[in-house]
Amino acid sequence: MKRKANAASAVEERIGYRFADATLLERALTHSSALSAGSGRSESYQRLEFLGDRVLGLAVADMLLRAFPQATEGELSRRLADLVRAESCAAVARAMQLDSAIQFGTTKGARARLTQTILADACEAVIGAVFLDGGYAAAAALVERFWRERMLAPPRPLRDSKTVLQEWAQGRGLPTPLYREVARSGPHHDPRFRVTVELPDLPPAEGTGRSKRAAEQAAAAAMLQREGVVQDDGYG
């Protein structure tokens, strides 16, 4: 119990927010595998992640409007999609060091399942927890703290990753990349897709997203980055 409290306190220090209701942060850092028999899934981070996803989108949209007053709706939409996608949220989760704070079950190998999706969900759950504990202003301040530098970074290529990958493959005499949906999870109203992209003589690459298209974009971006075509992945 003391170890868990210390981990939560360390997270509060890193995110710059102290919870009035410590159980909210505890829930935000609890994977469903850590729940005891008979516990409802509401005791894990899932409901907070649902809320945090919406708060994050609103906060980032507000930041973009203020930072880029001359940007078109299309440019704002591309920037928003880039900043709130799973890969970006997972990177922020690592910056918050949530990877060492998430509570998993005691089953052997449970922590080995610490995937990008889990990191992204935990990040959004923490935002949701801050929103419930301190209101929108506190949650927006947290988002600005961890997303402002990302937002102000040079824009990513406007061409989507699937287009770049296809052009790269064609330039090397390879066929059109093949995308396969390998998994779908989550409720009907908020699904998560996992997709692989394949090219001859190359290992497949994988991506996740809230739509099949977003997952395909993420998979293409992962292959481009792995093959050294781009230094960072493109819009997902």
Image (cartoon, helix red, strand yellow):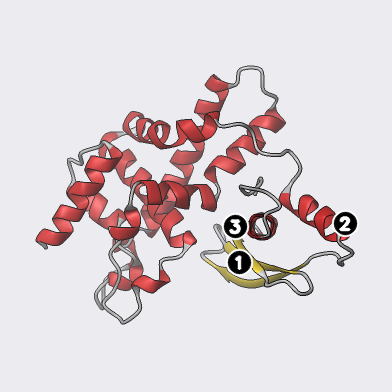
Q: Quadrant of residue 179?
A: bottom right
Real-space CA distance between mark 1 and mark 3, rounded to the nearest whole angstrom: 7 Å
Residue hosting label 1: 194
Looking at this view, is 32 or 1 the one in front?
1
Assign the N terminus to one quadrant of the image: bottom left
- Type of residue at label 2? Gly
Mark 3 crowd level (few <14, some 14–19, many ≥20, 10 Å Cα): many
Q: Earlier in the sequence, mark 1 or mark 3?
A: 1
Instruction: Determine whether, in the image, residue 105 is placed left or right of residue 74.
Output: left
Provide the secondary structure element on which disc 1 rests.
strand
Q: Earlier in the sequence, mark 1 or mark 2?
A: 2
Name the outermost residue toward the top. 69
Provide the secondary structure element on which disc 3 rests.
strand
Residue hosting label 3: 209
Which label is found at residue 119? none
Looking at this view, is 80 or 92 the one in front?
92
Q: Is residue 136 above or below residue 33?
A: above
